[in-house]
Image: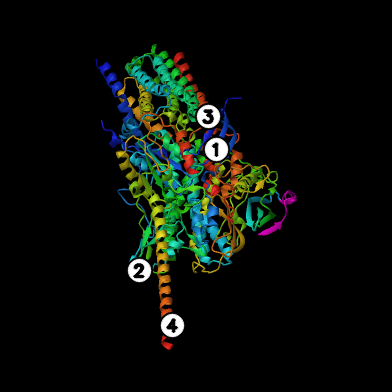
């Protein structure tokens, strides 16, 4: 009973938690830059304000794709939290991203096209690592179910540390953080795919980012198995690491990003996979 | 400031003989109304200390076409295009509309008589 | 549910230089700096008209940037507030009567707050923004009329045809 | 042969301070052609200066040509007006002008560096540089009474005096600033990702710099030793307050950052020398004459060589005033140096030119 | 790498922000702020109006010749040239107060253009009026003198 109730609660509260996390992260970022930063509830203020704006849509498909991006991402998160199939989770997540990319391509704005290009490239950069991770989990547990990982006695971290490092290396791409925030490089393409959204429809994209946070930190949490303490530690460590990295690096070009993520992170994950399959 | 008089015919020859990219740099091209004539000036300056400003000038009448010195001084096109718009003089193969909007009368710097 | 109070909690600003000296622009940049950190008020400098609420305009509107200014204003979804930063944006300042600029932003788009000073201090800009927030809360989603921009309000929910407006102001100018 | 995108940047773009329009023709994000439209800011100041304003008012009008180098504009105009009036100004006025010019150079260079950092996606460094920059703004406000528009040089001298305690304050703040500057140099030089973004990007070779007559830090980064402070002595005595030329050879964005940072050291030294050896004399030379004849003045603004040409006709109103701003000379070089770079680094390259289009277009 | 740990370290340092609306920031006491006007000292020479680059000062004049001083803080560029030009000490002075913002209701741009033209007009009207008066006066004197002369001649005969 309990093991169903908690995930359902988590799923329902996911946007709320994500918003809080995002607000907290903005404060941390500001503090790292010696600023005071916005209040903790700032994302929700933005949310309510955006709900109040006049609705302007480029065309209906565009807006629809934006909303579907949010919905499918939430669905992927639900499957993950309910301990579903990891491959299914990853592909649902891929679907949601590709919906956004389609939305980017469906407009006439050049910046939107460029952003879609770059988003596609960044998907190319981090998806292999996630898939290899899932496969090595399969090698270990003999099943793709996340539930098996959540209930496994000893944490995955000890079995596949290299995969965890690889995940840490690709998370900045996923969360659009410097140095790998080429997808929404604000000074170059002013937000990329989000450019053409406005008002209520931008809200979907804006909120989907919160879900992304929850999704990524859940992936990190996977590595702790059923060890809650270790999991929390890992999440906090990743949080600090991501923000410090964000505040100490410039944006690299997308070619360098691709080279790095496929070359280093991909190799690490693959070595890890080999080790797991051999053992 | 050293002022050297020249005329449109052998302007290119004079400047070409004078201008050495490693010794001088081209500053700007300017035009001043003097009576009904127009005095067009080309300013150069040398790199060394003390840097002396050299000014080639030619007295033209407003409807004459000034030969462009783009092939001698590569960066002169900006100054020429600006002067064409502001002083309403003619420079060879330089179009109007670099500075001013099309819906505006040309030569705003000319003194209204 | 009344959402108006939340408008002034997250104003996203958009900055456009309509052809002034960069003085006020670097002061707006300085407002983002850690000394006066306007993110305290939840402001983000979005480079994107479609997601911003406050338009900060600097500079007397030159003839070449006038159309772009009106386009940007038309792209912003209501409710929105326009702040003119500096003397030359408010009234033309020292550039009044020069042949290539119109005196002030409010010749084209309705301006709500005029920030005086040449150049404005960041404190003055923050004061102006704080006053603008009070106005933003009272705003409706209807379209506003400007001095030159004589145009009846477009129906709610329809997208504004910005080309149309830009064409319309041309005869007034020339 | 990939698909060609035409990417317009500007007139309103988050990475631009002022309306400037670049049209990049890119092929899988590699720039193959650039069209620039730099005259958004044209206001017609030259025409107004020789028709509407009296020659004493003009020094306040030309200050509004550009907010970043307003002191350079006012000083250059005052100098050319003094040439036409055939007067010489007191020594103290000269020193105070140099002092404010150097303070302005520090703030302008720091602003440009922070802008480069932001446009290369390094927000934290942008914040840090802006935070360290505030001290120069406060000093300028304390000396001139305004943060941006100094209105410090007037025809015949300077408008305000420097109080001795103010001089001590400046020296104190500069001493506090030194370690921060060291920190900035460390970051700009050694940060890995920043050099990935900046090294070998937007290269302008020395030959191109000569061919296209580039001035200012852009030229000095390319190894072309052009600096008006090095070439003229008569108007402002730069040499005796310890100016020294700084050049680099790489000519890319990173080299420009380094040039600017090292020039800040020189400016600090100049300011210290000026305050320590500030001569006592009057501030303004009064005269009842009217401008006559023609003259030219060159001055080193933060962005390079500033050139003024003025012609008077024995009346209150000038006959002709020609302003050549530094960026005006650099436009050709700017457009040239984009070709062959990633579009992703175009924003950083624009910022590293430190373009000042309100100077260019006037 | 150094910046990485520096960023983490910044978490525990105090932010440098000054909460502006609630606490004051650094402002020199000789900041070039609003232009003040002391009417009792003014000698109405209009030099400030002549020297002001943007034309932020204008004097209007009613029919009795009483002048009033108008100043627009949104046009003023705070250069302080009017204070330097003022011959009477203290009539014009520059305060250290930054100008407050103006709202839409003030109609600070077009309203000022209107006021400016009206002020110039009013001065011209007054000048014309004065000219007319003096002309009438002169004409009256002429007539009187002529009368007297006439009378003188009559008495002679």
SS for dot 2 = helix
Q: Which residue in the protein does label 3 denote? A: A256
Q: Is residue E100 magenta?
A: no
Q: Nearer the viewer, mark 3 or mark 4?
A: 4
Range covered by the magenta-colored residues: B1-18
* Rendered residue at 50%/32% (across/down): A252
Question: Is tag 2's residue or tag 4's residue first in the polypeptide sequence?
Answer: 2
Dots 3, 4 in contact, CB < 8 A:
no
Single out the residue that lies furthest toward the top. Answer: A142
The image position of residue C69, as x and y in percent, is: 45, 40
Q: CA distance from mark 2 to mark 1?
A: 56 Å
Q: Is residue A149 visible?
A: yes
The percent coordinates of residue D228 (x first, y second) are: 60, 55
Q: Give the mark toward the camera: 3 or 2.
A: 2
Q: Do circles 2 and 4 both sit on a common chain?
A: yes
Q: CA distance from mark 3 to mark 4?
A: 109 Å
- Which residue in the protein does label 4 denote? E149
The numbered disc on residue E41 is 2
Discs 3, 1 touching: Cβ within 8 Å = no
Tag 1 residue: D22
Q: Nearer the viewer, mark 2 or mark 4?
A: 4
Q: CA distance from mark 2 to mark 4?
A: 48 Å
- Tags 4 and 1 on a common chain: no
Q: The disc numbered 4 marks a residue on which chain?
A: E
């Amino acid at each position: 009973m309990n093991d169903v109730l908690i995930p359902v609660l988590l799923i329902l509260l996911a946007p709320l938690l994500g918003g809080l996390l995002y607000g907290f992260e903005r404060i941390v970022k500001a503090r790292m830059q010696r600023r005071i930063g916005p209040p903790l509830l700032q994302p929700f203020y933005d949310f309510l304000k955006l709900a109040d704006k006049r609705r302007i849509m480029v065309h209906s498909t565009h807006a629809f794709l934006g909303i579907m991006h949010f919905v499918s991402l939430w669905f992927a998160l639900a499957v993950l939290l309910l301990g579903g199939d990891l491959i299914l989770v990853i592909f649902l997540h891929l679907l949601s991203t590709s919906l956004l990319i389609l939305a980017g391509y469906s407009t006439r704005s050049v910046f939107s096209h460029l952003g879609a290009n770059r988003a596609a490239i960044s998907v190319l950069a981090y998806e292999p690592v996630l898939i290899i991770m899932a496969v090595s989990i399969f090698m270990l547990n003999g099943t793709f179910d996340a539930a098996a990982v959540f209930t496994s006695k000893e944490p995955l971290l000890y079995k596949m540390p290299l995969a965890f490092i690889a995940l840490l290396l690709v998370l900045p791409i996923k969360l659009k953080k410097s140095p790998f925030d080429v997808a929404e490089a604000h000074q170059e393409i002013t937000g990329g795919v989000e450019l053409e959204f406005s008002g209520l429809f931008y809200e979907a994209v804006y909120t989907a980012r919160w879900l992304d946070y929850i999704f990524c930190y859940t992936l990190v949490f996977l590595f702790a198995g059923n060890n809650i303490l270790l999991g929390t530690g890992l999440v906090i460590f990743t949080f600090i690491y991501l923000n410090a990295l964000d505040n100490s690096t410039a944006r690299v070009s997308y070619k360098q990003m691709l080279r790095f993520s496929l070359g280093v992170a991909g190799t690490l994950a693959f070595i890890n996979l080999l080790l797991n399959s051999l053992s | 400031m050293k002022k050297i008089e020249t005329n449109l015919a052998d302007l290119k020859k004079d400047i070409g003989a004078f201008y050495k990219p490693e010794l001088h740099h081209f500053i700007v091209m300017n035009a001043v109304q003097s009576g009904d004539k127009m005095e067009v000036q080309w300013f150069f300056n040398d790199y060394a200390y003390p840097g002396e400003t050299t000014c080639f000038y030619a007295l033209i009448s407003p409807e004459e076409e000034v030969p462009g010195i783009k092939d001698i001084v590569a960066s002169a096109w900006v100054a020429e295009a600006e002067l064409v718009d502001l002083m309403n003089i003619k420079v060879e193969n330089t179009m109007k509309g670099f500075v001013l909007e099309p819906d505006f009368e040309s030569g705003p710097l000319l003194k209204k008589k | 549910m009344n959402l108006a109070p939340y408008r002034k909690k997250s104003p996203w600003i958009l900055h456009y230089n309509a052809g002034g000296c960069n003085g006020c622009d670097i002061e707006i940049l300085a407002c983002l700096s850690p000394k006066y950190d306007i993110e305290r008020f939840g402001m983000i400098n979005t480079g994107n008209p479609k997601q911003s609420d406050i338009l900060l305009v600097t500079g007397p509107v030159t003839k070449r940037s006038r159309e772009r200014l009106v386009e940007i204003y038309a792209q912003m979804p209501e409710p929105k507030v326009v702040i003119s930063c500096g003397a030359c944006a408010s009234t033309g300042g020292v550039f009044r009567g020069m042949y290539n600029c119109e005196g002030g932003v409010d010749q084209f788009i309705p301006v709500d707050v005029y920030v005086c000073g040449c150049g404005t201090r960041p404190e003055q800009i923050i004061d102006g923004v704080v006053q603008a927030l009070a106005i933003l809360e009272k705003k409706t989603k209807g379209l506003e009329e400007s001095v030159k921009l004589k145009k009846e309000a477009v129906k709610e929910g329809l997208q504004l045809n910005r080309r149309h407006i830009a064409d319309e102001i041309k005869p007034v100018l020339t | 042969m990939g698909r060609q995108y035409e990417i317009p940047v500007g007139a309103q773009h988050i990475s631009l301070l002022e309306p400037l329009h670049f049209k990049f023709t890119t092929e899988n994000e590699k720039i193959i052609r650039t069209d620039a439209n730099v005259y958004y800011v044209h206001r017609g100041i030259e025409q107004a200066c020789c028709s509407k304003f009296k020659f004493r008012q003009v020094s306040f009008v030309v200050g509004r040509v550009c907010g970043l180098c307003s002191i350079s504009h006012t000083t250059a105009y005052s100098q050319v007006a003094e040439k036409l009036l055939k007067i010489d100004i007191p020594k103290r006025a000269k020193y105070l002008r140099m002092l404010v010019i150097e303070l302005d150079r520090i703030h302008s260079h720091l602003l440009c560096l922070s802008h480069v950092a932001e446009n290369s996606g390094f927000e934290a460094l942008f914040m840090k540089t802006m935070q360290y920059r505030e001290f120069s703004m406060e000093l300028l406000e304390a000396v001139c009474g305004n943060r941006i528009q100094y209105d410090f040089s007037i025809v015949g001298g300077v408008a305000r005096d420097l109080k001795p305690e103010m001089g001590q304050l400046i020296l104190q703040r500069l001493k506090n600033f030194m370690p921060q500057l060291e920190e900035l140099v460390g970051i700009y030089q050694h940060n890995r990702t920043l050099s990935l973004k900046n090294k070998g990007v937007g290269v302008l070779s020395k030959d191109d710099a000569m061919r296209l007559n580039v001035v200012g830090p852009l030229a000095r980064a390319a190894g072309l030793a052009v600096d008006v402070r090095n070439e003229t002595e008569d108007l402002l005595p730069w040499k005796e307050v310890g100016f020294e030329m700084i050049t680099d050879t790489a000519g890319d964005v990173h080299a420009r950052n380094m040039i600017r940072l090292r020039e800040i050291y020189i400016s600090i030294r100049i300011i210290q020398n000026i305050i320590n050896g500030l001569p006592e004399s009057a501030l303004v030379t009064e005269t009842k004459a009217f401008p006559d004849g023609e003259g030219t003045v060159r001055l080193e603004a933060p962005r390079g060589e500033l050139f003024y040409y003025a012609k008077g006709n024995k009346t209150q109103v000038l006959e002709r005033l020609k302003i050549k701003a530094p960026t005006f000379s650099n436009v050709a070089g700017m457009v040239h140096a984009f070709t062959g770079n990633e579009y992703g680094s175009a924003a950083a390259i624009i910022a590293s030119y430190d373009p000042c289009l309100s100077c260019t277009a006037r | 790498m150094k910046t990485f740990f520096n960023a983490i370290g910044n978490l525990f340092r105090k932010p440098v922000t000054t909460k502006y609306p609630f606490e004051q920031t650094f402002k020199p006491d000789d900041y070039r702020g609003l232009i003040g006007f002391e009417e009792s000292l003014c000698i109405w020479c209009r030099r400030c109006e002549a020297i002001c680059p943007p034309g932020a000062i204008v004097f209007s004049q009613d029919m009795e010749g009483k002048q009033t001083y108008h100043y627009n803080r949104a046009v003023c560029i705070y250069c302080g040239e009017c204070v330097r030009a003022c011959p009477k000490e203290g009539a014009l002075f520059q305060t250290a107060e930054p100008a407050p913002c103006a709202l839409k209701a003030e109609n600070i741009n077009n309203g000022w253009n209107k006021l400016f033209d009206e002020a110039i007009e009013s001065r011209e009207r007054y000048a014309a009026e004065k000219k007319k008066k003096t002309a009438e006066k002169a004409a009256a004197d002429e007539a009187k003198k002529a009368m007297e002369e006439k009378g003188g001649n009559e008495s002679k005969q």
